Image (cartoon, grey):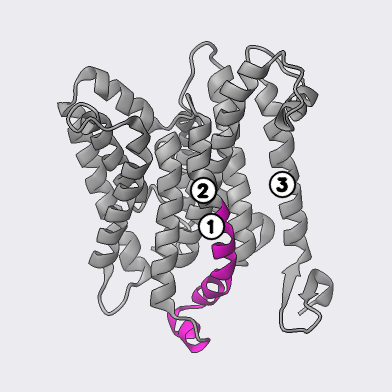
Amino acid sequence: MNKHRYWTLRSRSARFHMQVEKRSVRTLAILIALVIIIGIIGVGIGETWIHPWEVIRAIFGHSSGNYDFVLYRLRLPRAVVGLLAGAALGMSGAILQGMIRNPLASPDIIGITGGASVAAVLFLSYGNSVFHLSIDWLPVAAITGALVVSGLIYLLSWQNGVTPMRLVLIGIGISAGMSALTTFMLVISSSFTASKVYIWLTGSVYGATWSGVYSILPVCIVAIPLLLYFARSLNSQELGDDVALGLGVRVQKHRLMLLLLSVILAGSAVAVVGAVGFVGLIAPHIARRWVGRTFGSVALASGLLGALLVFVADVIARTAFYPIDIPAGIFTAAIGAPFFIYLLYQHRNRF
């Protein structure tokens, strides 16, 4: 092991020690700086240009007062929701790709997003008209749908344990079923409901509020230490289940916990921005190229890259065709669909 490539962190008593790769730390620092810089500049872009210094002052509560409504009510909550939702989707995709050991896995491909979408469409169609529920219950419905469908995938995949290949194949089948069910509900819905559902299914950050921030922020904060805790387990699982078991990893228990974490991250994101596609697929791929294959670094880099993808897509969506506000999911799909085809071609000999 080349000691010049790593920094060693050790407590005084030497009970705690770990090594971090210098390249990963530098890359993560650059990504954090990019998220901050692009986030500040992106908030200022719009019909009314707001200088980055004014945005910084507003963030720290010292605004001049000239742009308070635009910043505090419209652009800042929308920017923060986009960043957090993108981070959640990126981390969710990193977990799935690490757990399934398949570069084509992502929450929208193996059915997690599909489950959240079906529950959300059901809620939008009947939640208010039949059960008189407030729209505030939409995140609960989406996360519940994601959990139910993930539980179904896990149960159907179980046969003296869950293997990655069985999980992904059954997930793809369930995803197709969820897509068909969503289409059926759209067909029998009224035109007004169907138009709302179409926008939601495409994925849009339009109309994001601070309540959306408060619903997804705790999930992202709790997820980061859990990801770092399970990093050793996933690094071992990448060598194969037998090797991981030999290293003392409780593979099946950790796999279930990681799937649950991935579902909650994806479900929370879908609940606030809709079914923004391909972020969980693209971000981990770029992250692995930049920080190597160590899971802790990949998961953090995937979160930062996912945040950038959704945020930049939303800035383009709300400014490129002004005054029309295009759903951000259209732009992530425009990048993600060709990228997915490229991955299929690149890995064609593995299947």
Q: Which residues are magenta?
A: 221-247
Residue at image location 38% in from the left, 41% down from the top: 139
Q: Quadrant of residue 273?
A: top left
Where residue 51 appears, as percent x and y from the top left, is 77, 20
Which amino acid lies under the numbered mark 3 shown in the image of this protein?
Ile
As helix, strand or loop, the secondary structure at mark 2 comes to helix
Label 3 to label 2: alpha-carbon separation: 15 Å
Residue located farthest toward the left when viewing the structure as drawn:
188
Any part of residue 143 in sight: yes
What number is the disc on residue 134? none
Place of residue 13 in the rendered image (x, y in percent of width and height, measured from the top left): 78, 84
Q: Secondary structure at mark 1?
A: helix
Disc number placed over residue 88 in the picture, else none: 2
Residue assigned mark 3: 32
Relative to residue 187, is residue 87 drawn left or right?
Answer: right
Q: Residue furthest bottom?
A: 246
Q: Position of residue 44 (x, y in %)?
A: 69, 22
> In this view of the protein, can residue 90 be seen by the observer?
no
Q: CA distance from mark 1 to mark 2?
A: 9 Å
Mark 1 vs 3, N-terminal side: 3
Amino acid carrying mark 1 in the image = Ala
Compare residues 268 and 23 and report the one nearer the observer. Answer: 268
Please report whichever mark, 3 or 2, sits nearer to the chain's N-terminal start: 3
Above or below, 249 against 91 in this view is: below
In the image, taking residue 102 as reference, residue 305 lies left or right, namely right
Q: Give the main secondary structure of the magenta stretch.
A: helix
Residue 142 is a magenta residue: no
Could you classify mark 3 by the number of other residues whose Cα lies within 10 Å: few (under 14), some (14-19), or many (20 or more)? Answer: some
